[in-house]
Image (tube, rainbow, N blue to C red):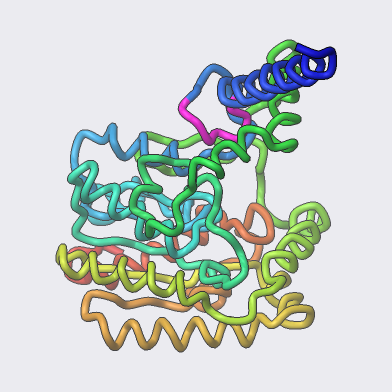
Amino acid sequence: MSAWKKIFTTVIAISLVITSGIMTLNYIVNPHGKYNSNVLPSLVWTGRSDKASLLHKLNEDPEILILGSSRSMKIDPEFIEEKTGLSSFNAAVNSANAEDYYTMLRYSLDTLERKPNTIFLGIDVEAFHNNTPIDERLLFNKALSKYLNAQDRISFIDMLTSLLSYEETTSSFVSLYYKLSAYPDRSTYYDDNGFLHYIQKSGTVTDENYDSKIEDYIERYRARYDGYTQLSDKRKDYFEKFLALAEEENIQVIAFITTLHDDIIRDLKKTRNYDDIKQKLVNYLNKMDEQNENFVYEDFDRVDKYNGVLTAFYDGAHIHEKNANRITRRLLEKAVPDEFKG
């Protein structure tokens, strides 16, 4: 073997060792909660895997299943049981889109064989965004992603690309640093019924803390509406499959458009196409309401639509229990009008 061949072989061997080492590191450390390894805590919010695990551990089928994004995580199963005697579980996940509603319902019905009688569904206006990808936390969750359309699932190449990505690798080293020093304090935790508690988000919006609680979310929600020009056909397809499945199983779906703080909406009206997109969503949901006997919805995008309170927010997008309970009362009036105690 010539000297050049030896050098080439050595370089290839070293590259393979480094590559496999990076992939092994990222898989074991698992900083974004994508893989099966639980050696170290995830650095990101892993709502999908957390809720799937909690739903699996329930002792009985929930009579009401709550779906949606983090903006629906304050719909409280204990409040529902107190008012109606009905058991429920909050399966809302962070940054949920229409495909999340469908996959979580399939997981509950097909994998766990848990069938609710009613679904309370919180729909974010941006849940039908036509220019955002499926959330990686869904794509890499094997329990849920198997219910995605075949063309939407990740490939082996996607998995390798993720394991070798710069973002994943730097996050692994951050996680290892925290392991040697200390991980940041937890910001949230869930009850066994899926209800979310904030540890670091405390208090409600006031004149004194307005800047920190609202202005940051104005910039964040502007970004969420970038490139949002129409409702995604693919996400409408997932939503319609969700409704068809619920109807097939004789499950009542009571939905609501989730709330944003008035100042967030006011800014989106000025700087983005909120009014146009919101109207397209309302038109679509009206159509679904007409075509599906088991589906109704309410538009609760602003607090004045359900007698809510502008100060009952943790930030610009996440409502406090006070507002969440007022929404829940309205949903229960539709779900169990005879039994609801008010």
User: Eyeballing the image, is 209 above or below 46?
Assistant: below
Q: Which residues are magenta?
A: 30-36
Tell me what residue is drawn at x 44 percent, y 41 percent: 141
Task: Looking at the picture, tell me which residue is in the foreground, 1 or 152.
Answer: 1
- What x and y, as percent, mark residue 40? 58, 19
Q: Residue furthest front?
A: 1
- What x and y, as percent, mark residue 143? 36, 41
Task: Looking at the picture, tell me which residue is in the foreground, 331 or 90.
Answer: 90
**Quadrant position of the N terminus in the picture:** top right
- Does the magenta portion include 128? no
Q: Quadrant of residue 142?
A: top left
Tell me what residue is drawn at x 35 percent, y 35 percent: 54
Is residue 221 shown left or right of residue 42?
right
Q: Overall secondary structure of the magenta stretch?
A: loop
Q: How many marks?
A: 0
User: Eyeballing the image, is 276 above or below 38?
Assistant: below
Is residue 206 shown left or right of residue 110?
right
Is residue 56 shown left or right of residue 45?
left
Is residue 296 visible from the viewing direction of this image?
Answer: yes
- What x and y, as percent, mark residue 130? 57, 73
Q: Quadrant of residue 66?
A: bottom left
**Quadrant position of the C terminus in the picture:** bottom left
- What x and y, as percent, mark residue 267? 76, 75
Tell me what residue is drawn at x 54 percent, y 17 percent: 39
Is residue 191 shown left or right of residue 252?
right
Is residue 199 visible from the viewing direction of this image?
Answer: no
Task: Looking at the picture, tell me which residue is in the foreground, 201 or 294.
Answer: 294
Tell me what residue is drawn at x 35 percent, y 52 percent: 104
